[in-house]
């Protein structure tokens, strides 16, 4: 495999040009990176038939894969017309996540792009769909696309959490903002920065309802401190005051409302691996994926969004 940084688009198994194709092509051009497209095929019926008639199954599978390869090559050709270097392949595999991890280990990926797939909470708990596996466990930044009304994003919203002041949390917040700033620079997009807190919910969780009236002064002081941390963080990354939003309210609802009102194309936020019950219930990023009116870019601790383009300021509309 070539050692050049590239984007990886995970195409659907159906022969359908989805929003992720448009977004991947636009980002590859903006980020000045080659794009590799992969589709994962697997038909259970053919696999079962192969137990009884392996030769016939192999011919049927080869014909099915060839048809998909040809279609994917055509889609790659359409994207390459815009000056993007594109390659493609189709892989016969039952469990795509393991295969994606092979790509992660074999080629230096700046970003994985995929259409977001809607799943019920029950399915997420018992079947661990690919989207949730990528959000929780994939070490590479993952962009899950819900729509591509603007293939090259125009409005980007970065979400940070300043409730904790551990050094690792501050570093992670910087990584999230850095990724959002780079994306805004490369796409000539507008960037907003947000932190949402819900003091009442946090205190009730820690101390119970009975102690809530006693917490007012404490949380007012904490709020002042965290607001200062947020402002300093925004200042370090060159985000103007008018584009900083320190908001009290339910995090998921507040972020969704803001994104809808401001026509946000991509929400950039961090995700961390959870275990036990938290893993079953899902993180804020997973909840946002279900409810956000736009696409999500998930950043993992220690990983940054790579780029080949310049990093000058691009925060104005």
Image (cartoon, rainbow, N blue to C red):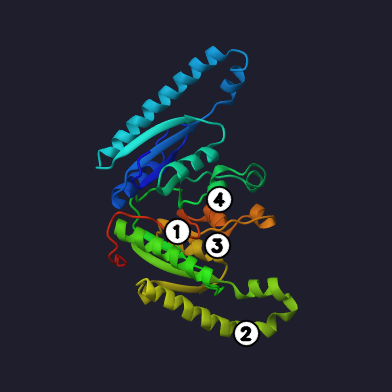
Cα–Cα gap, marks 3 and 2: 24 Å
Quarter containing the N terminus: top left
Task: Judge by depth and name the residue closer to the eye, 227 or 213.
Answer: 227
Residue 267's label in the rendered image is: 1
Q: Is residue 15 visible?
A: no
Q: How far across and how far down the image is residue 115, in percent?
A: 46, 44
**Along the polypeptide, which appears first: circle 1 or circle 3?**
3
Quick one: label 1, few (<14), some, or many (20+) residues within 10 Å?
many
Asked if residue 291 is positioned above or below residue 25 in the image, the reply reads: below
Q: How far across and how far down the image is residue 66, in percent?
A: 41, 22
**Pointer 1 and pointer 2: residues touching (CB < 8 Å)?**
no
Mark 1 or 3: the one toward you: 1
Task: Judge by depth and name the residue closer to the eye, 279 or 21.
Answer: 279
Q: Quadrant of residue 114?
A: top left
**Residue ID at (25%, 42%):** 82
Q: How far across and how far down the image is residue 154, in percent?
A: 34, 57
């Amino acid at each position: 495999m070539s050692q050049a940084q590239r984007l990886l688009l995970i195409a659907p198994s159906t022969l359908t040009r989805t929003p992720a194709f448009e977004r991947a092509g636009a980002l590859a051009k903006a980020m000045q990176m080659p794009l590799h497209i992969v589709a994962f095929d697997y038909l259970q019926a053919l696999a079962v038939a192969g137990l009884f008639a392996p030769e016939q199954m192999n011919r049927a599978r080869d014909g099915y894969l060839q048809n998909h390869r040809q279609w994917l090559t055509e889609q790659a050709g359409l994207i390459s017309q815009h000056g993007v270097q594109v390659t493609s392949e189709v892989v016969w595999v039952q469990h795509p996540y393991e295969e994606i991890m092979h790509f992660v280990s074999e080629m230096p990926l700046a970003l994985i792009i995929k259409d977001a797939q809607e799943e019920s909470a029950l399915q997420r708990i018992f079947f661990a769909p690919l989207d949730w596996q990528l959000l929780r466990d994939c070490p590479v930044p993952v962009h899950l696309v819900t729509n591509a009304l603007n293939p090259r994003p125009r409005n980007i919203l970065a979400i940070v959490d300043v409730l904790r002041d551990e050094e690792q949390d501050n570093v992670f917040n910087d990584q999230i903002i850095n990724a959002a700033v780079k994306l805004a620079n490369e796409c000539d997009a507008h960037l907003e920065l947000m932190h949402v807190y819900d003091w009442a919910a946090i205190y009730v969780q820690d101390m119970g309802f009975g102690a809530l009236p006693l917490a007012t002064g404490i949380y007012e002081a904490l709020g002042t401190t965290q607001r200062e941390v947020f402002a300093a963080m925004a200042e370090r990354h060159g985000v103007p005051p008018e584009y900083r939003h320190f908001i009290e309210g339910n995090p998921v609802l507040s972020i969704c409302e803001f994104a809808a009102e401001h026509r946000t194309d991509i929400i950039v936020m961090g995700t961390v691996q959870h275990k036990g019950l938290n893993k079953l219930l899902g993180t804020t990023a997973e909840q946002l994926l279900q409810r956000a009116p736009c696409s999500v870019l998930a950043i993992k601790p220690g990983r940054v969004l790579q780029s080949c383009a310049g990093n000058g300021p691009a925060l104005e509309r």
